[in-house]
Amino acid sequence: MVFPDFPVKMINADQIAELCYERFSQLPRRGKPDPGREWTLLAAVVQVTRSEMEVVSMGTGTKCIGRAAMSPAGDVLNDSHAEVIARRGCIRYLIHEMSRAVSGRGSAVFCPSDQRCKFRLHPGVSFLFFTSHTPCGDASIIPMSDSQSQPCPPLTSGNRRGQTDAGRARKRVAEDPREGRNSKLPHLEEEKTSDLKQEDRKQPESQTEVKPRSLDQTDGVGERPQVLDIHRTGARCVPGGPADPLQPGEGYHSTGLLRVKPGRGEPTLSLSCSDKLARWGVVGFQGALLSHYLEEALYFSTVVVGKCPFSQDVLHRALVARCSHVSNLPAGFSVCPPVLLQSSLEFPFSQNQTQLQHQVGQGRISPCGAAISWCNVTEQPLDVTANGYKQGVTRKALGSPQARSLLCKLELFHSFLSLVSTTDPSALPQSLRTPELHTYWDYKQASQSYQQAWQQLHSQAFPLWPRSNRNLLLFH
């Protein structure tokens, strides 16, 4: 999408959403939800220049594998939430562009920096992040009365099912097994996998009206708005820290905490998307490996959320405020809070839209089991997975290269090693010149500035963030 003299600071949320939805519609049918029966979530990375906006990576998905299914070979895709898929696809794209830059073929993203053997973004190039739904975890714990001019008003204390505006809240209300179901609404499947965007559920209404801590505005009569409940998240508090009170209404969750995604009947080691986006706002979204080549970390200038229950204050708390005090970061790293926007356009394959399109005889509505990745690379731009492996792979083929997702740790590591091998030895970053580099773990740890930035973030903001299991990272 090209705009004459496009001003980077004038990002239009609906324009971004439309661009992402249109790009999704152009993808092949494989891996997409069955209309009216399956739903999914969409996320994308958009590259912005002075005159153009372009989707460079896109992901769909709602699932996450459990701890027992993780592989020490790095050949399983652990987290298939849309936000993670989109970011990992962007890593593929950035490695591809860095390969062009180091080989002198010309990159649309990177150019040499003043620092020897390092690269930076071309002037005027930036990246923004789009997600069709508020990220799972802390950003999804939204007071139901928080209707700050949002295009998709959540269920407030004055609404009841059966009233004219109840349809707007069906996505959150119709599935609750603790409430009497509305016979006119589809019976949603009780999904045990990490269907985290199905999380915002409504408790039986408390007799006590609760005021949300996060809201300061009045209701126009000089009183604070009354709240009976909050949208919920299925992400669980990390072990060893505070737990959710599980009280009725607003007291069900604690806010501002690190959370892990639930898996298929067992815990996972994957942190919530809210937590990961907050982390990327300090250490960058480029990861440890690409940091070897970069003068500065890469940050999302803007985060755009599609039409869904939304709170600007809550999103700011989850993605920005928790890390805003972090200091003493190494050169090239800083706290870079993104601009937070919401679009009025809803993803056509959202749970809400699927529910509206559902017809008798289609069976239960359920999240799509596949995850789609597309990124702007020349070879194999499309990658469709299920349960951490290529979709359709047979059990006999598990463990073979044909079964691996192009986004798994092993494949991304091999792509990075190809980048290193094509770099002229005289142009190789100093951190990659040591002969002790063999495993994925070695290469990540050798990215010292990145590790220092992560250590500062860990100690100052996220001390309960679980440490990576080294035994799962010793592949090569």
Image: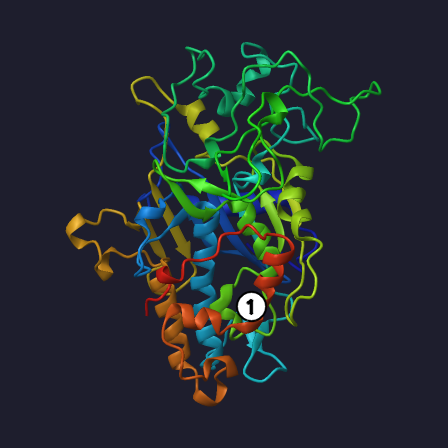
Which residue corresponds to the image point at 60% horizontal and 65% vertical from the top-left? 453
Is 261 placed above or below 250 here? below
**Rendering quarter of residue 297:** bottom right
Would residue 60 be visible to someone looking at this image? Answer: no
x and y, in percent, of residue 155 in the image: 60, 21
Residue 280 placement, left or right of 33: right
User: Is residue 371 or residue 140 the one in the foreground?
Assistant: 140
Is 270 placed above or below 333 here? above
Quadrant where the N terminus sits is: bottom right
User: Is residue 345 or residue 129 the one in the foreground?
Assistant: 129
Quadrant where the C terminus sits is: bottom left
Is 159 placed above or below 329 here? above
Which residue corresponds to the image point at 67% horizontal and 54% vertical from the top-left? 337
Residue 299 placement, left or right of 171: right
Q: Which residue is outermost to the right?
A: 222
Instruction: Determine whether the residue tagged by mark 1 lies in a helix, strand or loop.
Output: helix
Q: Which residue is outermost to the front?
A: 240
Would residue 418 be visible to someone looking at this image? Answer: yes
Q: Determine which residue is flagged by label 1.
A: 450
x and y, in percent, of residue 217 in the image: 78, 29
Q: Which residue is outermost to the bottom?
A: 426
x and y, in percent, of residue 2 in the image: 58, 57
The amino acid type, in three-letter code, at marker 1 is Tyr
Which residue corresponds to the image point at 48% horizontal and 74% vertical from the top-left? 446
Residue 142 placement, left or right of 180: right
Is 95 placed above or below 341 here? below
Dot 1, how many residues are within 10 Å of its Cα: few (below 14), some (14-19), or many (20+)? Answer: many
